[in-house]
Image (cartoon, rainbow, N blue to C red):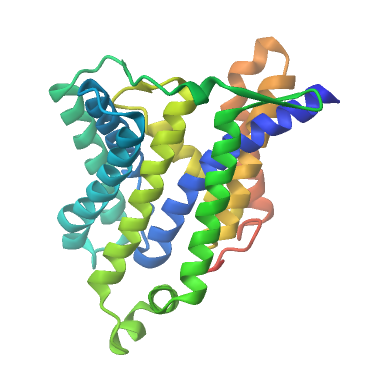
Amino acid sequence: MNEFIQQMVNGLSLGSTYALLALGLAIVFTIFGLVNFAYGELITIGAYTMFACSSLGLPWIVQALAGILAAALASILMELIAFRPVRHADGTTMLITSFGVAIAIQAVLTIVVSARARTVPQPSWTVATLSVGGITLPAYQVVTVLVTAIALLAMVLILKRTNFGLAMRGAAENFQTARLLGVRANRMVASAFLISGLLAGIGAVLILARTGGAVEPTMGLAPVLKAFVAIVIGGIGSLSGAVVGGLVLGVAEVMLRAYLPGQVTGLTDGILFALVVIVIVARPEGVMGLKARLRT
């Protein structure tokens, strides 16, 4: 039983990272109608910014803040330079644009920095552990769960209690009507990308804490694919659905790796995606319901 609980804790921690990134994908989709597959590169940019700061000998907290801000700035520039010119194009054009941006950023990082993995030294708390009733809780897992909970709560409060949140929900409900009522389209889309970038930067900090600080040009690919799967499971357009989908995916992944026979453990991702197909067929609207509007 202790082993099962331990694996559940591991799964919730991993799922919290997926949930955090899924929130960033979901909010851009509901406002802009785009599944941004260049989102993983925002994680990479945040991580490489931390690497640059560590090379300068700056404290870890400064590295983390710089990484988060760099990801947010890159997200805004991405919207301004790459996505705004094709805003009124069809979905296929925007999707191809997102793949093009991702490949371009990976190529630039490979040429300018290196294709080899680099390491960002992590603070001592990332390897600390807590013991509760025979269950070992690594500190970074606790921090990951808490950060995801705080991010979701902050998003709910912003959307429910502020004029900005009201405007954003209105834009998600009916973008054209919101514009006629005075909501500035460019500001809403840029704000969605800003929030998405901030979440990607936070995700980069947590991913480095989990992996021991390994940084490479393609490090954002796997997390963004898992985040996309999470929002499909939970229901695109639902913030709570993105969180639920991320947690479900994280727990399922850890449980499969822990309890599958050793000779088929390498098939974990394949089994996960097969289960996702089953979920889509059985419930196309997702666990929390696929909606066109921004739900909490």
Position of the C terminus, as image quadrant, is bottom right
Query: How many dots with numbers?
Result: 0
Using residue 101 as the reference point, say whether residue 193 is left or right of it. Answer: right
Viewer-proximal residue, 143 or 242? 143
Position of the N terminus, as image quadrant, is top right
Q: Residue at x 31, y 16 (%)?
A: 117
Asked whether residue 55 is in view, the answer is yes
Residue 252, image x, y percentages: 67, 34
Above or below: residue 121 compared with residue 25: above
Using residue 160 as the reference point, say whether residue 135 is left or right of it. Answer: right
Q: Residue at x 59, y 32 (%)?
A: 141
Write down the quadrant of residue 138 in the picture: top right
Which residue sits furthest front?
A: 59
Viewer-proximal residue, 15 or 141? 141
Write down the quadrant of residue 180 in the picture: bottom left
Q: Residue at x 45, y 31 (%)?
A: 207
Above or below: residue 161 compared with residue 194: below
Which residue sits furthest right?
A: 1
Residue 247, image x, y percentages: 63, 43
Asked whether residue 273 is in view, the answer is no
Residue 221, image x, y percentages: 38, 33
Viewer-proximal residue, 147 or 276? 147
Above or below: residue 139 compared with residue 224: above
Which residue sits furthest bottom?
A: 181
Residue 100, image x, y percentages: 23, 42
